[in-house]
Amino acid sequence: MYKRFFTLLVILVAFPVLADAPRYLPGIQYQLVQPPQPVSSTSDQVEVVEFLWYGCETCFLIQDGIARWVASQGGKIKYVRLPAVTDAGMVLLARAFYAADTLGVHEQIDGPLFTAIHRYQRRFDSESSVVEFFNEHGVPRERAREAMRSGTTAAKVRHAQLMARRYGIRGAPTLIVAGKYRVDPSLVHSVDELIDVVDFLVQSERTGPH
């Protein structure tokens, strides 16, 4: 009789703790950035940084879902996209990312470049192949080449490399929330869960620190 009562008491005491347990946990579905990094968002926004690489198929697959989630947040987040540069093989497409920004043709290049690589299996392994792609999308070859080689583009690529080291990313895609939390596909089971973990961390930041 006393044993039954004790078991029931333990269940009743433990239940509120279990009910209040967070859906996602550090070291399981996300990791802590050590040390936390400064953010560029205002006090009423949560910064979310997406590290991407055009050659990454998972990056391609999450773009639509991420775009819908960002749109649903209104002005509550500051969303920043950076090319992931964790090894030398990622530099060329990072230069393409920043050249498109410099030329003001990001919308003309970003989605189509992802699609060309992952839907049509086009290879971009040289500056000339990237310049030709820009030309196909309305950018004169010489302007594209100048933007790819510019000092501004080179400086931005170096900055992306520095940020990748500071956030401790290992590859793409990786998402950073509030300069404190790192989420990548190795920690989750689907695109939907990846976005849900990021949303959970954003909501947690709004309501108070972990």
Image: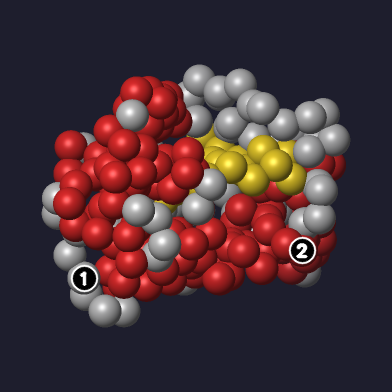
Choose between 110 and 189: the one closer to the eye: 110
Instruction: Locate residue 128 relative to residue 75 in the image: left or right.
Output: left
Which label's residue is closer to the chain start, 1 or 2? Answer: 2
Q: Is residue 51 visible?
A: no
Where in the figure is residue 113, as x and y percent of width and height? 36, 64
- Residue 124 vertical placement versus 100 (above, below): below
Where in the figure is residue 70, as x and y percent of width and height? 68, 58
- Residue 93 vertical placement versus 47 (above, below): below
Where in the figure is residue 27, as x and y percent of width and height? 47, 44
Residue sitting at x 42%, y 62%: 138
Residue 78: which disc? none
Residue 122: which disc? 1
Tell me which amino acid carries mark 2.
Ser
Label 2 environment density (alpha carbons within 10 Å; few <14, some 14–19, many ≥20) = few
- Residue 146 vertical placement versus 202 (above, below): above
Residue sitting at x 34%, y 57%: 134
Say which quarter of the image contains residue 143: top left
Choose between 5 and 189: the one closer to the eye: 189
Residue sitting at x 28%, y 33%: 149
Image quadrant containing the C terminus: top right
Residue sitting at x 50%, y 30%: 33
| Gap between marks 1 and 2 measured at Cα | 33 Å
Label 1 environment density (alpha carbons within 10 Å; few <14, some 14–19, many ≥20) = few
Tell me which amino acid carries mark 1.
Arg
The reply to whether callout 1 and callout 2 are in contact (CB within 8 Å) is no
Where in the figure is residue 178, as x and y percent of width and height? 64, 35
Image quadrant containing the N terminus: bottom right
Choose between 190 and 154: the one closer to the eye: 154
- The residue wearing badge 2 is 72
Instruction: Locate residue 27 relative to residue 5 in the image: left or right.
Output: left
